[in-house]
Image (tube, helix red, strand yellow):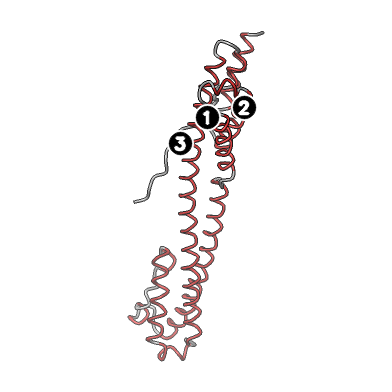
Amino acid sequence: MKKQSGHRKYNFPDADLYVQALERIKYAARDRALFQQYGYSVERIKAFQSMCDTFRNLPDDDELVGDQMLMTEKKYEAAEKLKTAIRSLMTRVAMKYSNRSGRYRKFGTSKLGDMTDAQLIFCGRRVIRVGRQQIDFLAEVGVNENVLRRIQDAVQVFENALNIQQDRVAERDIAVERRTEQGNKIYDELVVLCNIGKDIWAERDPVKYEQYTIYESNNDQKIARKMKEKKNP
């Protein structure tokens, strides 16, 4: 059963989380003497900065999806080459036997275009096996070891391409989970930092208090700015 990725605790893009965290770290460094009164040390601010730097260097989903798409395209190309090699053999088999005969049916290629990846691999191997069993009968239509080896090589290339593509899918799942976990840690630390900052400035300086407010979107910031402008025309 596929493991579900963790739930993101924030509703805005990772890039916005990173920028907001850096801004609040800058304010906390400015207010470090006051933060120390809450037990929030300079070392913790630096650790938060390091956490953000690590998060910034994680590959984002667009990058991972791009890699996955490239491997999927290579898999499709390999699949088509395998199907072409199989069809080339089956053209020769049809010349020797009717495509309604048991000998033709034994190759199991009637639904070649609709096969799943796994079915296509099994079909390729079956075609090679059956072809070798009948190679003496099919020699007169040009079936030889070179024809079968072409299919065998195509099966191997396709299977390798499929494995690599599946690896990229798994790598993306792992990376999404890792990024979600790291993002949640940053968000949790950001909330702690901002709560301290707002508590410090709640009755001292409304501007600095506002600097520690977390916005979930640009629209939130616009609304806050308009409300501030109404209060201070």
Do tag 1 and tag 3 residues touch (Cβ < 8 Å)?
no
Reply above or below: 233 against 79: above
Do tag 2 and tag 1 residues touch (Cβ < 8 Å)?
no
Q: Residues within 10 Å of mark 3 (few under 14, many from 20)?
A: some
Query: Which residue has dot 1 on it?
Result: 190
- Cα gap from disc 2 to disc 1, whole angstroms: 13 Å
Q: Position of residue 118 (x, y in %)?
A: 40, 65
Reply above or below: 134 against 71: below
Q: Position of residue 189 (x, y in %)?
A: 50, 31
- Cα gap from disc 3 to disc 2, whole angstroms: 27 Å
Q: Where is residue 215 in the image (x, y as percent from the top left)?
A: 55, 25
For label 2, the SS is helix
Do tag 3 and tag 2 residues touch (Cβ < 8 Å)?
no
Q: Which residue is drawn at 49% across and 26% down?
A: 192
Query: Which residue has dot 3 on it?
Result: 8
Reply above or below: 174 against 32: below
What residue type is disc 3 on? Arg
Query: Which residue has dot 2 on it?
Result: 29
Residue nearest the observer in this picture, 99 or 131: 131
- Upstream in sequence: badge 1 or badge 3: 3
Q: Nearer the viewer, mark 3 or mark 2?
A: 2
Residue nearest the observer in this picture, 146 or 13: 13
Q: Residue 139 carries which label?
A: none
